[in-house]
Image (cartoon, coloured by chain):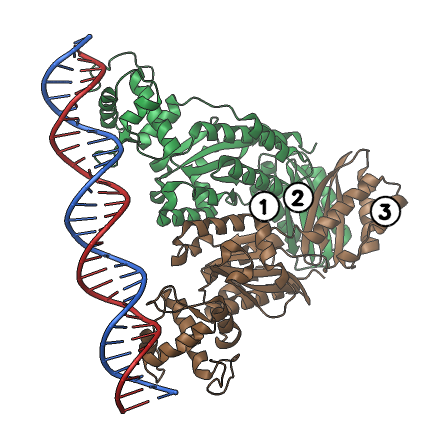
Chain colours: A brown, B green, C red, D blue
Amino acid sequence: MSSGSDGGDAPKGGLDKRKAYILATVVYEYIATAEPVASQALTQKYSLGVSSATVRNEMAELEAGGYLVQPHTSAGRVPSDAGYRMYVDQLMHPEQLASDDRKRIRDELRDASRELDDIIEGTTRLLGRLSKNLAFVTKPVNDTTTFKHIQLIWLGARTGVAIVVTSIGVSAQSVFELSSDVSPDDLTRLSNALNARMGNRALRDIGEHEVAAATQELGLSDDVKNAVMAALRSAASQDVSNVSASGAQNLLDQPEFHDLRKLRSILRIVEEQKTLYDLVADSMNREAPAVKIGHELGVEEMTDFSIVTVPYRFGQHAIGMLSILGSRRMPYARLVALASGTAETLSQRLTDVEIK
Amino acid sequence: MSSGSDGGDAPKGGLDKRKAYILATVVYEYIATAEPVASQALTQKYSLGVSSATVRNEMAELEAGGYLVQPHTSAGRVPSDAGYRMYVDQLMHPEQLASDDRKRIRDELRDASRELDDIIEGTTRLLGRLSKNLAFVTKPVNDTTTFKHIQLIWLGARTGVAIVVTSIGVSAQSVFELSSDVSPDDLTRLSNALNARMGNRALRDIGEHEVAAATQELGLSDDVKNAVMAALRSAASQDVSNVSASGAQNLLDQPEFHDLRKLRSILRIVEEQKTLYDLVADSMNREAPAVKIGHELGVEEMTDFSIVTVPYRFGQHAIGMLSILGSRRMPYARLVALASGTAETLSQRLTDVEIK
DNA sequence: ACTTGGCACTCCGCTGCCGAGACTGCTAGG
DNA sequence: CCTAGCAGTCTCGGCAGCGGAGTGCCAAGT
């Protein structure tokens, strides 16, 4: 059995050094070529110091250990999910973000006067282009940011619009209709009262009773209170499952997606943003970049895909995630660096332009 | 020559009645089956009252006239762009919108308190689902609507946000930064002055001098004026080439898109919203639904596609367009009815909930 | 003059077959 | 424990053969 002595030092998750190197090389090579990797190809391209026969023996053991699979007898080896997992966790060399890419991300995020949605969307597109895969970014969850200002604008005796500004920017606007009349002055006074009461509080700490207190003080109907609450709630939650996505056409470049059924299910999932969101929701509060590989995604149709997810922050709090979806054969090291770098820059951008 | 006598009455664009019927049937059948249509298939499925040999003769003449093409000798016939054009313009029976679909559209648009962007996006999704093709909708051009209200909100000595409300809803918000200090009162007074001056005027008629007059009156810097102008301009133009699209995965159901290159170019075009917008921009001010077929789109990669476009209105003015993109083999009659019905309902929705 | 049945012809697409090539697993010897 | 060599297995591309679908045309009928 392979677990007898293990041949030498075991610095890499139970694999001896040579096996680890061979596995890493197989994964690397397969990522680059999309072709099953043969023992000979390895000895020729990489100086292993051993013959292809030896490599074959090692590969056979790696296959027994579940790290490699063979599409059919007399084909080269391909990494299994476990093989990729090992590669990602232990074997790959972390990469630095190319300075060229770093510059483009900075440039994209430089302009100070853009709307939040715009920033998210622009970042998504850029990430799609740079990663050459499908990028998607969740909209920020706003409830840890602070309330800055509410303005109720009178439009007619029974209609108006409520605008909520938080430390992250203008984050909600909602038109409301009332069942009884209000005056412009009522709304102005209410705006002032609310601002005085709630200014600089965390959005999630603002309860219904404070709004109720303000409206009652001014003798306004519950209708108005409900309109304000609706605006505050939508500022806090920002339609979380609304995900911005870009770069679907990049997936077509990968040979594994020439299968149309796979492609369809991916496009469907991207369009149904909820599913996309659910796939990565649990990565929100992790520190390190999260990589989900093939079956780990838990979706039948996505066994050929992987997703890299990195949260972005406002101040200390993670408020959203930025993900790259692509073939399981994706260049993990590069994409992890790219996603992390982008998340970092985006976090800075959001935090720095905080409205004081 | 076929133009010698033409055999009988010529009620349909120069084709005698039987030719017209045969052409219509070929198009209809090809739309349904995606297979080249054979003379025998026609005589069997439709009661033409003549034999397949006669149909063959007619088909040969329709081919000579440019309405049909043959993929290869000994295959059935397929409509050419001209054939589709004839079908759309003269031959097809206009359809009514299915009452079931009508109901779903109404339901989608019922909810009164939604944001404009939301409405557009919801309509796009629905149209994608109902059409089983790719739907895309341009954002409304706002410059024919009227200015209702501007509110400048003070956020700090040198920052603020400007919010513009037009008769169509809240249509712009922009954060600004100033090079000198202003007070909250300054902004409130300026808001009031601007509202008094510009209320109920068409957005496009508002010039820089009026804003300048108001700021000067209050002794405010040009900085402030520029911020206001920026907000007004963005309210008027709404990033017109920003197009909402939905249903790309539907295209995969059509056998003609199993060619990956076509698919890629379509996905690229959809992602580059500008191109999509340019394709239909000239249909904005037409009364009737516009149908562009294959080469008529003027884009090499799109010769297999057609687009149906219908403008939607605010009051009397066309302010945007709603389009369905699909295979050239699309069910034109149904999609024209669907697009028209949706545009109609959307127009009503936008106009009725006008802020008074 | 138009229609129609019949027939020869064309072209497509499917199937089965063969040979070349790519790798492996195994064995025997260093 | 490594390696050279060899037999065995599987894939893939190309090719020939064949059946089917559909046309074009001709000659006869109305």
- Where residue C30 sits, quadrant-wise, is bottom left
Which label is found at residue B234? Answer: 1
Secondary structure state at the residue bearing disc 2: strand
Chain that bears disc 1: B
Residues at discs 1 and 2 in contact (Cβ within 8 Å): yes
Chain that bears disc 3: A
Which label is found at residue A149? Answer: none
Residue at (22% x, 33% y) in the render: B74
Please tell me how crowded label 3 is: few (under 14), some (14-19), or many (20+) other residues with Cα within 10 Å: some
Q: Is the C terminus of chain B in the top left, top right, bottom left or bottom right quadrant?
A: top right
User: Foreground: A238 or B274?
Assistant: A238
- Where does label 3 land, which residue? A212
User: Foreground: B93 or B321?
Assistant: B93
| Residue D14 vertical position relative to residue B27 in the rendered view, above or below | below
User: Foreground: A79 or D19?
Assistant: D19
Q: Nearer the viewer, mark 3 or mark 2?
A: 3
- Where residue A252 sits, quadrant-wise, is bottom left
Could you tell me the amino acid type at mark 3? Ala
- Where does label 2 land, which residue? B164
Q: Is the N terminus of chain B in the top left, top right, bottom left or bottom right quadrant?
A: top left
Task: Using residue A204 as the reference point, say whether residue A53 is left or right of it.
Answer: left
Task: Using residue A201 as the reference point, say whether residue B145 is left or right of it.
Answer: left
Please tell me how crowded label 2 is: few (under 14), some (14-19), or many (20+) other residues with Cα within 10 Å: many
Chain that bears disc 2: B
* Residue B54 in the image, given as x and y percentages of width and height: 23, 19
Q: Are marks 1 and 3 on the same chain?
A: no
Residue at (47% x, 74% y) in the render: A65
Could you tell me the amino acid type at mark 1? Ser
* Residue A192 in the image, given as x and y percentages of width and height: 82, 49
| Residue A316 vertical position relative to residue A155 in the rendered view, above or below | below
